[in-house]
Image (cartoon, rainbow, N blue to C red):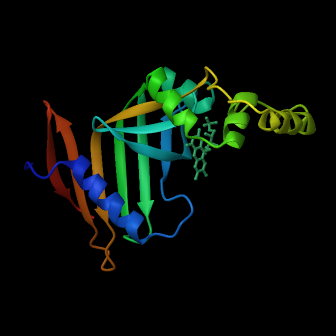
Amino acid sequence: MSKTKQPISLFSEWFQKELNLTKVQIPTAVCLSTIGIDNFPNARFVSFKEIINDSFILTGSLNSRKGIEIKNNDKVALTFWWTKTERQIRIQGIATEINKQLANKYFSERSKKSKAVSSICEQGKEIDNMERLEKQILRKVAEDKNIPRPKNWGGVSIKPLRIEFMEFKKTRFHDRKLFEFDNGEWNMKQIQP
Ligand SMILES: Cc1cc2nc3c(=O)[nH]c(=O)nc-3n(C[C@H](O)[C@H](O)[C@H](O)COP(=O)(O)O)c2cc1C
């Protein structure tokens, strides 16, 4: 193993390059994998917000399936695939809940419609009456006042322990750099494609 460039700055560099080139609607999409209560892995796309203190921030409902799974097991994975630069980034790390102030900040940046959906819906629960639920959301949007952050809406900060950067090559001899955090520092090894 050799010491090398810090992976967080490499991530930011790669992300910025993709953002400069891509035209996709949600370039921040990332696959979040959790370990289910039933031990099945469970994956879904979410939106990557930003890096704070070398950790990756995501937001959403805390008592949905992903929230419950993270509370039960804080080991998670993130997988990015960027089509313009043909790069994949795989991250494994430990998730912790972000504080209320930060959750308030992210919630305040959401559109009124998103705020209304988050405050009315219990993400993942079965719908008894679709029409009633939609009406409740519309009523909430129409109310001429600020919608406060529901207690069950927040975010997680994922502290990475392993980050793999893969550059896809037409030759199939893909470039793979695996960074592992050990004893307070990052080590890198080049791994076979
Ligand atoms: C591109 C994309 C971005 C998404 N962003 C988020 C997000 O930032 N937060 C979130 O809770 N759900 C987001 N979702 C919805 C999730 O995929 C998922 O349906 C929801 O979080 C419920 O997952 P759960 O039942 O595992 O908790 C996004 C979906 C897509 C396709």
Viewer-closest of 183 and 9: 9
Query: 46 above or below 75?
Result: below
Relative to residue 114, is residue 178 drawn left or right? left
Find residue 84 and report its image quarter: bottom left
Viewer-closest of 51 and 186: 51
Asked if one can make out residue 40 in the rendered structure from this viewpoint, the answer is: no
Question: Residue drawn at (68%, 30%), measured in percent from left and top?
Answer: 146
Question: Residue drawn at (56%, 34%), measured in percent from left and top?
Answer: 107
Asked if one can make out residue 114 in the rendered structure from this viewpoint, the answer is: yes
Q: Residue 8, percent across and down?
A: 25, 47
Viewer-closest of 187 and 118: 118
Q: Residue 163, percent across and down?
A: 29, 47
Find residue 20 and report its image quarter: bottom left
Q: Residue 58, percent across and down?
A: 47, 38
Question: Residue drawn at (41%, 63%), measured in percent from left and top?
Answer: 19
Location of ligand 1 given as a quarter of the image: top right
Query: 123 above or below 48?
Result: above
